[in-house]
Image (spheres, helix red, strand yellow):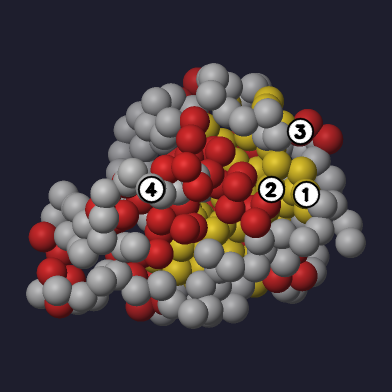
Amino acid sequence: MSIANIVCIKWGNKFPPYYVNRLYAGVKRNMKRPFRFVCFTDDAGGIRDEVEIHPLPVVPFEEKMVKAMTTGKRRGAWRKVTMMKPDVVGLEGPTLVMDLDVVVSGSMEGFFEHAPGKICMGRDWLERRRRRVGGHGSVYRFDPGKHDFLYTEFEDDIDIAVAFKGEQRYISLTAHKYKQLEYFPDGWVCSFKRQGIPLMPLNFFIEPHLPKTCRVMCFHGDPKMEEAIVGAGSKLRYKTKPAKWLRELWLDSHERDWMPL
């Protein structure tokens, strides 16, 4: 088996280092082939030694990108595009980019075997409902040597790229333009708040669900894992009973004894 690349990015103080550590642990439990786990970050403190640390990529459009990241609805997301810079830290071959607010819940092998040579994403739930092209940006696969246009088109005209209103729409529609977009099979990438939490008012009485086909559960928006594991949430629609299955999938083994149910 070829070595698999797993890449994540951590900047600012939104996510503590244990989000990186637990993502690494989840990948390790669910990967048979050797893998390279890379984290781009502006603060490596607290990240486990097995993770390959690199500074955030330096790009010529930094000023414009920072402006895009601090205004509008999709603040912050554009930093991920810098990881697709050609020849960055020697990445070669299929590379899986993962957000930090996801939990690995099943085999990761298929993410490197499905639709080889294509840019693959989970189907975005809202875009499916709208009957539009669109993948979700929490988990996607590309090849830096084959899909450099994802970076170069952004670099060539960042204003047009930002008009896509979010990096996942930019990646989806640019990949689609080049006839390189494929979706991972339905059920592999799931949304906790859309597929895990029962509809209101059942969410107050029934525990959150982990679909049998789910390989990566995404905690985009709210609640995040800390809230879901104890049954908390900032909105009535997303308040839940404790997601007990998260204890095994996300917590470190020594934490499972004292973390409240």
Q: Which mark is residue 208?
A: none
From mark 4 to mark 1, how far is it between C-alphas?
30 Å
Pair 2/3: label in front = 2
- Give the camera-side residue of 88 and 150: 88
Pair 4/1: label in front = 4
Q: Are marks 1 and 2 in contact (CB under 8 Å)?
A: yes
Is 37 above or below relative to 236?
Answer: above
**Left or right of 231 in this view: 140:** right
Q: Give how far across and how far down residue 149 sits, in percent.
A: 71, 49
Mark 3 or mark 4: name the one nearer the start of the chain: 3
The residue tagged 1 is 35
The residue tagged 2 is 6
Q: Amino acid at mark 4?
A: Asp
Mark 2 or mark 3: name the one nearer the start of the chain: 2
Mark 1 or mark 3: name the one nearer the start of the chain: 1
Instruction: Say which element carries label 3.
Output: helix
Q: Amino acid at mark 1?
A: Phe
Residue 221, visible in the rendered structure: no
Pair 3/4: label in front = 4
* Residue at the outermost right position: 1
Instruction: Say which element carries label 4.
Output: loop
From mark 3 to mark 4, how far is it between C-alphas?
41 Å
